[in-house]
Amino acid sequence: MSRAPIVLGIAGSPRRFGNSDRLLGAALAGAREAGAETRTLVAADAGLRHCLGCNACSLDGECVQHDGGPALYRAIDEADAIIVVTPVYFASVPGVLKVLIDRMQPYWARTYALKRPRPARRPGAILIARGGGDPYGFEHAEATVRSAFAVLDIDVLDVLATPGVDRPADLEAHPEVLERAHALGAVVTAEATKRLIER
Ligand SMILES: Cc1cc2nc3c(=O)[nH]c(=O)nc-3n(C[C@H](O)[C@H](O)[C@H](O)COP(=O)(O)O)c2cc1C
């Protein structure tokens, strides 16, 4: 397969152009330099209603809601790799990202309720920004994104968690972190390219 891999970045913060957006920007720049086509989906702008827990998706694998869901599912399905970035909010992910993650339930339903064949596994990565002023860490935010990635059959290649960033531009004082995010974007792209060729 000769096309460029599509790397989808999901921006999880309700605050635009802050620390997590900077992490994602660096990762997607690294992905582009490694040959990817990059796309960005901003959770806060995705026009998603929260999951109703109605389990209708367990009947046919589709969500019954008429909102930003179809565009979200198209973006997820077209991606060859997915990078999720999130700030830590009260030890977990912000509500806007949790709403998006809960809307992954149709993928769970297709695999576990409807027993459909699983799609090809894709690579991914998790980027986390946090102030670090509370004692509860980032592990719950990471676990929440990993849980969604498990349902999407995404292999997490790496997790980059950055404490000590609170004001929107704090990350600019940590160029080494931005370099690591940039490098991770390239690693994800290389793996996506390899899997595209093998398919
Ligand atoms: C509502 C809210 C809750 C937060 N909760 C935590 C927390 O539990 N732990 C933490 O380390 N930082 C917490 N923070 C700080 C953010 O993680 C930090 O400001 C981060 O850099 C924001 O990323 P952004 O610039 O991409 O929005 C919180 C910030 C907000 C606004």
Image (cartoon, rainbow, N blue to C red):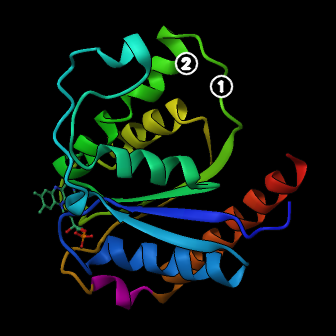
Task: Point out the image quarter for the N terminus.
Answer: bottom right
21 sits left or right of 118 in the view: left
The residue sitting at 73% across, 78% down in the picture is 35
Determine which residue is flagged by label 2.
111
| Amino acid residing under circle 1 | Arg
Q: Where is residue 118 shown, x and y percent of the image?
A: 65, 25
Task: Report the front residue among 173 and 62.
Answer: 62
- For ligand 1, the image quadrant comes to bottom left
For marks 2 and 1, the one nearer the N-term is: 2
Determine which residue is flagged by label 1.
118
Residue that extends furthest to the right in the rendered view of this protein:
198
Local secondary structure at mark 2: helix
Task: Point out the image quarter for the C terminus.
Answer: top right
| Amino acid residing under circle 2 | Thr
Q: Where is residue 80 shown, x and y percent of the image?
A: 65, 55
Q: Which residues are magenta?
A: 170-174
Count all numbered tags in the image, as a single digit.
2
